[in-house]
Image (cartoon, rainbow, N blue to C red):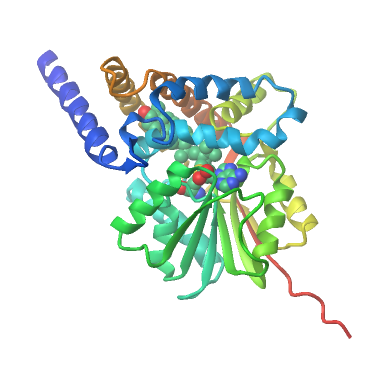
Amino acid sequence: MDSLALFCTGALLAGGLYWFVCVLGPAEQKGKRAVNLSGGSISAEEVEDNYKEYWKFFKRPKETTKEKVPDFVDTFYNLVTDIYEWGWGQSFHFSPSIPGKSHRDATRLHEEMAVDLIDVKAGDRILDVGCGVGGPMRAIAAHSRANVVGITINEYQVNRARLHNKKAGLDSLCEVVCGNFLKMPFEDNHFDGAYSIEATCHAPKLEDVYAEVFRVLKPGSLYVSYEWVTTDKYEAENKEHVDIIQGIERGDALPGLRSYAEITEIAKRVGFEVVKEKDLAKPPAQPWWTRLKMGRFAYWRNHILVTILAALGIAPKGTVGVHDMLFKTADYLTRGGETGIFTPMHMVLLRKPHPPKSS
Ligand SMILES: C=C(CC[C@@H](C)[C@H]1CC[C@H]2C3=CC[C@H]4[C@H](C)[C@@H](O)CC[C@]4(C)[C@H]3CC[C@]12C)C(C)C
Ligand SMILES: C[S@@+](CC[C@H](N)C(=O)[O-])C[C@H]1O[C@@H](n2cnc3c(N)ncnc32)[C@H](O)[C@@H]1O
């Protein structure tokens, strides 16, 4: 039995190593190897500095940090992008579990729902606000045949997304731009629709990103967002609740989670008409956090693997700290889901109204 356990562990480590080197490894980025798990755009030594900087951010008073949030988020994604891709896949978000379906299918269906909601047709031009390495973008382009333009602040993600688009044969439909969604490099009234999947939670002020989406959308078109929020079960005086929410904010580079009720208020303030809102995590939806819980064995395997790679000098030393942080974050997120005080899928469907006709 012992030798069987040893064999299984060895096989899993070998499998992990194969995935690490062969799947992430060949992606040469600007002359640096992505396999260093540093985001490829920074050197091995910089990983540790970035990691220290990342934690310092939370010690600064909130008023002094607003302007620095996009840089801090960029640093965060330099640190985690490879680990996310390695351990979760190309879509960096949650979705409700669907009995009898794989995580991959559940993820795709959650993404397709977004584009179905904004009612686009083949050939339309739509915007992906905070596109990551483009998992949702590719599913959405394949499903709708719309032209998708994604924007992300992180240059390494841009390179990864372009590489994946090409490999999937979807580069004629999918375009990726490096930029800040708080100040987008697009003209007014440019897009036929827009969506954001678990990305706008990184904005220090939701008004700012919603106002930008409003500006670039054509009048009459729709925007859907999956927002990370605290629910009405969250009690600010409850120590455990505060601990969970702060744990989620620290481990996911969030400048402060908003409440469920705030989202549509903000949307209306910038001029949107609210078409629909729903917490997609509410029953009968199956828990989104079971995938995090089920991954526990894999996390330990990954921890061992990352430790070995760092000891061998293949991955930078800071990687172990980053992985450890994510391990803890998975626990805070699970507790957020189980207590019901947090949801990563508050869906809001918004319309940019036509301007009133002047008489
Ligand atoms: C929307 C955001 C990201 C959400 C999720 C995609 C990620 C949140 C926590 C991440 C993970 C936690 C544990 C990691 C594990 C220790 C490692 O071995 C493999 C990768 C993880 C499973 C990783 C994967 C992505 C997450 C689930 C935020 C940032 C707004
Ligand atoms: C959790 S990931 C989600 C990515 C993608 N929507 C998905 O589901 O796979 C959040 C994304 O938002 C992007 N982002 C955060 N703040 C940003 C900003 N100010 N400007 C542009 N992109 C930003 C990150 O770079 C990252 O790509």
All told, the count of numbered labels is: 0
The answer, for residue 266, to whether it is visible in the render is yes
Image point (66%, 52%), residue name: 183
The answer, for residue 233, to whether it is visible in the render is no
Residue 156 sits above or below residue 16 on the image: below
In which quadrant is the C terminus drawn? bottom right
Question: In x, y percent, where is residue 112?
Answer: 45, 61
In front: 2, or 45? 45
Image point (32%, 24%), residue name: 315
In front: 241, or 251? 251
In which quadrant is the N terminus drawn? top left
Q: Quadrant of ligand 1?
A: top left
Left or right placement of residue 161 versus residue 242 in this view: left
Outermost residue to the bottom: 359
Left or right placement of residue 34 versus residue 231 in this view: left
Question: In x, y percent, where is residue 271?
Answer: 77, 61
Residue 92 sits above or below residue 171 on the image: above
Q: Residue 260 falls in which quadrant of the image?
A: top right
Residue 35 sits above or below residue 358 on the image: above
Question: In x, y percent, where is residue 32?
Answer: 34, 35
Image point (54%, 28%), residue name: 251
Image point (60%, 48%), residue name: 180
Outermost residue to the front: 31
Question: In x, y percent, where is residue 213?
Answer: 65, 59
Residue 296 sits above or below residue 2 on the image: below
Left or right placement of residue 287 versus residue 210 in this view: left
